[in-house]
């Protein structure tokens, strides 16, 4: 066919497009038939692919065939209902369709003018979501790709605030406080922003893995006495290991006293605040300066979509805004130009994903799914508590359960760690279930998280059966 515009002929696009949508539909329908965790060895996928690119055009049908043959064996199925590792992030039908549309439009929302709908839909959907989690209107939102990037921007704004308010501002003296259980992205942000190696002060946690406020107060006071410059606190709502919730109410008081910037990392658990019965987790966040929540983690929006809300967008803007001549427009004072609020110039039309998902499920639909995940997480916590040879190693405020097996009471901690690691590996090698781990007070801890949109009660019951089956086999081997 004559190819006037050099792109794939539109009829071929249509044909391949329908084929691909069928392929995805079949995949989602049968995802449970795949092993959850990819079984390949390092290099297996690379070795099946040619070293050099094709010089001549290839058929889409040949490319599609390689997806099944070469790529799929190397896929770990985040969409699998038995993926209960990390914080399982699943995509949903409306989210997948939105991704296709985003690529179809392929617009760049660096300025309002370069696609007004992109900017304005972002404003509207972020207001919707802000209503869903009941944050006050003074919170202004922006979409970045990942929570790591949202937190980086929040900390850069905190640095800007310190620079503007302290006439003796000294970059090498800045100090930022977070708990021992904070996500590693905070440390990465500190490195990226050029703060000193000792800038990050890790505050101890209590028995439930929550930041201890008086330790925070003590650290800030001591640093001030030593002529250092405290500028930011990062509290976590839903820490990565155990989903513990830092005492934001106390932390807010300390932040107010020293006039720092309080950033809240609620990347995963913040979504739970759409439930009226759990909305209290954000009670004191209205007195924070910024908060990050990732709809791509627990709101069935395909990766990536992270929201940063801040009450001080003008400081964020001053931290980043540089407008060269070629990017000036006549409407600057009437519109938001999102490029002014961050490192990146270009931006994808990510809000379409959130818009599709919220409209398709409705707020009530989303609440029902999350509520069910929490019910299942609590059910699993009870199963562990009621089984003699298992123990729970952390409270379960949401649907992430931290536990380990204790097969014989006189095992040393080291033997217990080995036993539990082997148990987890054997479960994961089975291809039927995927769990992950952390270490709590030196104890190897298995984590099971219910947050996948396809995960049902039957999946959870089967997971528990499998865990006990592998446990009994391993215990018999050891006896
Ligand atoms: C997952 C997670 C992050 C990092 O999220 P990305 O979007 O992958 O950068 C940060 N903080 C917490 C608490 C998380 O759970």
Image: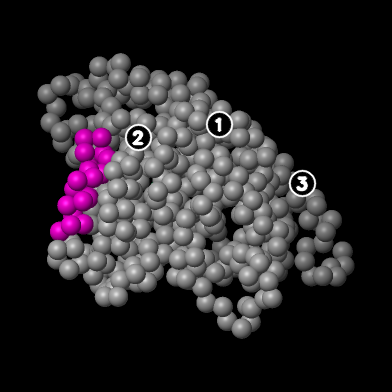
- Mark 1–mark 2 Cα distance, whole angstroms, equals 24 Å
Q: Nearer the viewer, residue 384 or 165?
A: 165
Residue 373, given in percent of the width and then of the height, sits at: 48, 29
Say whether residue 3 is magenta: no
Tell me: is circle 1 under 8 Å from ligand 1: no
Tell me: is circle 3 under 8 Å from ligand 1: no
Residue 191, given in percent of the width and then of the height, sits at: 32, 66
Say whether residue 211 is magenta: yes
Residue at point 75% right, 50% down?
Answer: 17
Which residue is labeled 2 in the image? 447
Q: Is residue 93 left or right of residue 439?
A: right
Q: Is residue 41 left or right of residue 130?
A: left
Q: Quadrant of the N terminus?
A: bottom right
Residue 148 appearing in the image: no
Which residue is labeled 1 in the image? 367
User: Which quadrant of the view contains residue 156?
Assistant: bottom left
Residue 89, given in percent of the width and then of the height, sits at: 50, 42
SS for tag 1?
helix
Residue 18's tag is 3
- Mark 3–mark 1 Cα distance, whole angstroms, equals 32 Å
Query: How many residues crowd mark 1 within 10 Å: few (<14), some (14–19), many (20+)?
Result: many
**Furthest residue in direction bottom, as rendered:** 325
SS for tag 2?
strand
Query: How many residues crowd mark 2 within 10 Å: few (<14), some (14–19), many (20+)?
Result: many
């Amino acid at each position: 066919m004559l190819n006037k515009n050099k792109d794939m002929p539109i009829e071929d696009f249509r044909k391949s497009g329908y084929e691909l949508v069928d392929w995805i539909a079949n995949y989602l329908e049968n995802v449970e038939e795949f092993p959850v965790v990819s079984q390949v060895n390092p290099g297996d996928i690379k070795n099946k692919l040619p070293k050099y690119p094709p010089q001549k055009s290839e058929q889409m049908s040949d490319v599609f065939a390689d997806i099944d043959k070469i790529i799929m064996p190397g896929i770990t199925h985040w969409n699998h209902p038995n993926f209960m590792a990390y914080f399982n992030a699943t995509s949903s039908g409306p989210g997948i369709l939105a991704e296709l549309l985003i690529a179809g439009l392929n617009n760049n929302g660096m300025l309002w003018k370069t696609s007004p709908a992109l900017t304005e839909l972002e404003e509207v959907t972020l207001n919707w979501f802000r209503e869903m989690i009941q944050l006050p209107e003074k919170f202004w939102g922006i979409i970045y790709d990942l929570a790591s990037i949202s937190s980086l921007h929040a900390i850069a704004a905190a640095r800007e605030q310190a620079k503007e308010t302290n006439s003796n501002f000294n970059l090498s003296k800045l100090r930022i406080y977070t708990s021992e259980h904070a996500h590693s992205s905070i440390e990465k942000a500190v490195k990226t922003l050029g703060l000193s190696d000792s800038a990050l002060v890790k505050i101890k946690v209590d028995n439930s893995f929550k930041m201890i406020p008086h330790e925070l107060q003590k650290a800030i006071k001591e640093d001030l006495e030593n002529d250092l410059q405290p500028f930011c606190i990062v509290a976590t709502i839903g820490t990565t290991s155990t989903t513990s919730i830092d005492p934001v109410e106390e932390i807010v008081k300390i932040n107010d006293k020293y006039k720092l910037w309080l950033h809240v990392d609620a990347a995963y658990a913040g979504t739970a605040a759409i439930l009226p019965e759990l909305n209290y987790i954000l009670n004191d966040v209205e007195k924070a300066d910024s908060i990050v929540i990732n709809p791509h983690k627990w709101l069935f929006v395909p990766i990536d979509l992270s929201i940063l809300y801040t009450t001080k967008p003008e400081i964020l803007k001053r931290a980043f805004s540089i407008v060269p001549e070629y990017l000036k427009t006549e409407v600057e004072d009437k519109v938001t130009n999102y490029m002014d609020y961050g490192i990146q110039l270009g931006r994808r039309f990510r809000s379409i994903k959130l818009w599709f998902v919220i409209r398709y499920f409705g707020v009530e639909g989303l609440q029902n799914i999350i509520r069910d995940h929490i019910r299942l997480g609590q059910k699993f916590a009870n199963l562990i508590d009621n089984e003699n040879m298992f123990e729970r190693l952390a409270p379960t405020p949401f649907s992430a359960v931290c536990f380990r097996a204790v097969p014989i009471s006189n095992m040393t901690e080291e033997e217990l760690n080995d036993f539990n690691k082997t148990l987890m590996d054997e479960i994961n090698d089975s291809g039927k279930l995927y769990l992950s781990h952390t270490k709590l007070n030196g104890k190897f801890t298995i984590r099971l998280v219910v947050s996948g949109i396809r995960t049902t009660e039957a999946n959870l019951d089967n997971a528990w059966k499998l865990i006990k089956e592998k446990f009994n086999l391993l215990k018999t081997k050891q006896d």
